[in-house]
Image (cartoon, helix red, strand yellow):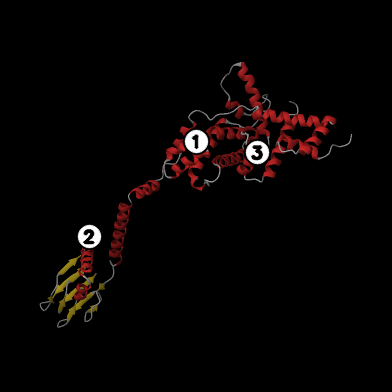
Amino acid sequence: MEDIVKKRIKQVLKGDQSAFEEIVSLYQNRLYQVCYRMLGNRHEAEDIAQEAFIRAYINLHTFDQKRKFSTWLYRIATNLCIDRIRKKKPDTFLDAPVPGTDGLDHYSSLAHDSPLPEEEVEKMEQQERVQYEISRLPDKYRSAIVLRYIEELPLQEISDILELPLGTVKTRIHRGREALRKQMKKL
Amino acid sequence: MKPCPEEIVQYMHDYLDGEITRRDEQILKEHLEKCPACQEHMDQLSRSVAFLKSASHIEAPEGFSNRVMASLPKERQSAGVRRWFGRHPMLAAAAMFMLLAGLALFSNFNTSDQQLAVSTQPNLVVEGNKVTVPEGETVKGDLVVRNGELHIEGEVEGDVTVINGSKYMASTAVVTGRIEEIDRAFEWLWYTIKSGVKEGLSVFEGPDAGDEEE
């Protein structure tokens, strides 16, 4: 797949914008998923994933074609997510917990507002819990945990994406697992 | 109860990372068998991981890639120009040459716009912006006066050109060559092209022809 991607990249660099569409199609699910898990909100996830692709397009000439494209793309997306999380912190009106919903905030209620059959609701509740627990992780650990357990990437690749030494990545994952364990003791 | 060895928790994480050595794994197993607290810790960690992995796969919303493509910056014009240059190198070179030549002529015309300029010939008299060929004197070669008045009372052995100015011929005046007056940019341009071509031709005629003109 990397070969097709490299071919398309060359076409885009020569000025063929339409060649970028295949790149988007190949990576859109992975990128959107990371953004959704990092941000916990569909609208924001789409916003940031879209922004990540646009930045990748604009800065494509800076991509070192000897390296793995997905790593570079993930890096753009995770950096944008972390920026967004940091900017979001001070304004709390949408992030404030909704009373009686076990810590779900207005964002999660915005995300699922259409009625669903009961078994769907049951399944959804567990999924909502997953998202909720991820969102409670400190952002330092969250990016490493999402890349490790949602994207199922090897440690070395996570270290390349986050531009952190392998040891630091391991520490963050260990601490992330410990934080999660403490959050979920009651489970 | 004696406290558990510190490295046990590290071994748990090494185990979960799939990076534990045989020896450490053996130590961990033996410890967990006799320590319910650490066993509980390990179970909680494993459950947390399993819980994370139960997260359902999420796909980008419908129409996502179309929206990305629609919001990309428009293909830069410079890219188009570069492509055109790539395809027509000769035309591009010609266009570039014309552009530069035009610019050079134009700037030439502009810079010489204000000041009096006279082709350097001996025995010309210059007073203010009045240039005189005195009576009884002979100027050898072509005479060009720019932004000034030319009074010819003597003799000129060559062409006379007056640019952006005027010319008075006394009854005693003799000009062996052609007389031309130019006062607009377009004509100046035309004149420059004409003389350029003439010079070009004189190159083809060989150095001797050029010497004769001097």
Residue B60 sits above or below residue B159 on the image? above
Residue A143 sits above or below residue B209 on the image? above
How much space separates mark 2 and mark 3, taking CA atoms?
71 Å
Report the front residue among B11 and B114.
B11
| Residue tagged 3 | A144
The residue that appears at 14% across and 72% down in the rendered structure is B177
Mark 1 — on which chain does it sit?
A: A
Tell me, yes or no, whether dots 1 and 2 are on the same chain: no
Report the front residue among B173 and B54.
B54
Circle on res. B186 = 2
- Ranked by sequence position, the earlier of labels 3 and 1 is 1
Q: Position of residue B77 (x, y in %)?
A: 38, 46
SS for dot 2: helix
Residue B19 sits above or below residue B189 on the image? above
Left/right placement of residue B162 relative to residue B47 reads: left
Q: Are marks 1 and 2 in contact (CB under 8 Å)?
A: no
The crowding category of the residue bearing disc 2, from other C-alpha atoms within 10 Å (few below 14, some 14 to 19, many at least 20), is few
